Amino acid sequence: MADPAFSLAPKPSGATAVLVLSDGHVAWGRGFGATGNAVGEVCFNTSITGYQEIMTDPSYAGQVVTFTFPHVGNVGVNAEDNEAAVDGAVGCIVREDVTAPSNFRSEGTFDAWMKAKGKIGIAGLDTRALTRRIRLSGAPNAVIAHDPDGNFDLDALLAKAKAWPGLVGMDLAKQVTRSAQEGWEGGIWTLGKGYGRSPHDTRPHVVAMDFGAKDNIFRNLVQAGARVTVVPAETSLETILSLQPDGVFLSNGPGDPAATGKYAVPVIRALLDQGMPLFGICLGHQMLALAAGAQTIKMHQGHRGANHPVKRTAEGVVEITSMNHGFAVDAATLPDGVVETHVSLFDGSNCGIEITGKKAFSVQYHPEASPGPQDSFYLFTKFIESLA
């Protein structure tokens, strides 16, 4: 269903940015950040804080984020709040012009930061109309473009949007994973002290498979009592076992879990067969489910925001969670021996599993993102306690 706010309208005076959807609809606005153009899937995020963390979350690779909260830029940016060193979202869409920072932690403006990161921004769009469109018609492929002179070849941009294959079948973990094994250092952040240090002791050893991980996940593993080694997405079973882990963590990440699973699922299944304790988040959750025999599906609009209610099926307790995913585990395909532990109260979709007789569980949401703000921290403690 088309929205009148998105039509092949002539460029208004002063427009320096454009969003061209693959169906030919166009929205004009004011550009900020980097210049040029980029292609991706357009999604929306309902969070009212954390725009820097969202833009540096590797799970957003291949996506353009529409912020439903109208005021973006008001806390500026700083070096401590990046979630990863690799690329996340390719660009973002905001309603109002980026505001000047007013926060004691700010080290710069969001506009300049976006430019330095090579990310394209467009302001002045009706983000409510775009969000409605995504909810009705699904997340579209599009090109976001910024030229200070306002010169755009709409035919070329439309052709690029149409040619992009979309996220189904796309393995993006290879683009955002670490290139080499790394001994993780650093605990959670504390005001006035920054990030803590990881103690070098005899703590349980967790090997984390990096499919596009947020660094704060590793900090929370350290806080819960682990010693962490991070390995690239395509690390072999033999290499993982040679590190003598007490447990293995499966990280979040972008793209289609079935595509990444072609090389990761056999490793995860072998770890399961050996009785290795496993904990997965987001993409890691989906691949644990695939390894257990379930299937994943592409969602209509996805879940992205910091206010998603999730029910723990055993206790009936509701957690307020942070989410970012466009694929989901198909609960109807869960085999015997795989228990659904969490469900979304928005749409009933699967948000967690546990494998009977194994020390293996996972959740679809992001417990490290301080939702609730501490509703979900228990998961890290649960994993570390399972390593004993």
Image (cartoon, rainbow, N blue to C red):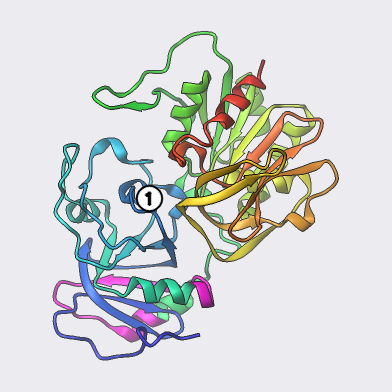
Q: Can residue 87 be seen here?
A: no
Magenta segment: 135-158
Q: Quadrant of residue 349?
A: bottom right
Q: Position of residue 190 (x, y in %)?
A: 32, 25
The kind of residue on which mark 1 rests is Ile
Residue 221 in the figure: left or right of residue 28: right
The one of 68 and 199 positioned closer to us in this rendering: 68
Q: Where is mark 1, residue-wise?
A: 54
241 left or right of 181 in image: right
Left or right: 216 in relation to 70 = right
Q: Residue at x 55, y 31 (%)?
A: 208
Q: Is residue 299 magenta?
A: no
Residue 73 is situated, as x and y percent measured from the top left of the image, at 22, 54
Say whether residue 34 is visible: yes
Regarding mark 1 in the picture, which secondary structure is present there?
Answer: helix
Give above or below for 209 relative to 89.
above
Tell me where residue 61 appears, x and y as whole percent: 44, 55
Farthest-out residue, top = 201
Q: Residue furthest front?
A: 316
Residue placed at 16% from the left, 49% from the top?
Answer: 101
Q: How many marks?
A: 1
Q: Is residue 180 above or below residue 134?
A: above
Give the residue displayed 63% in from the left and 56% down from the top: 328
Residue 218 vs 338, above or below: the answer is above
For residue 143: magenta?
A: yes
**In front here: 9 or 310?**
310
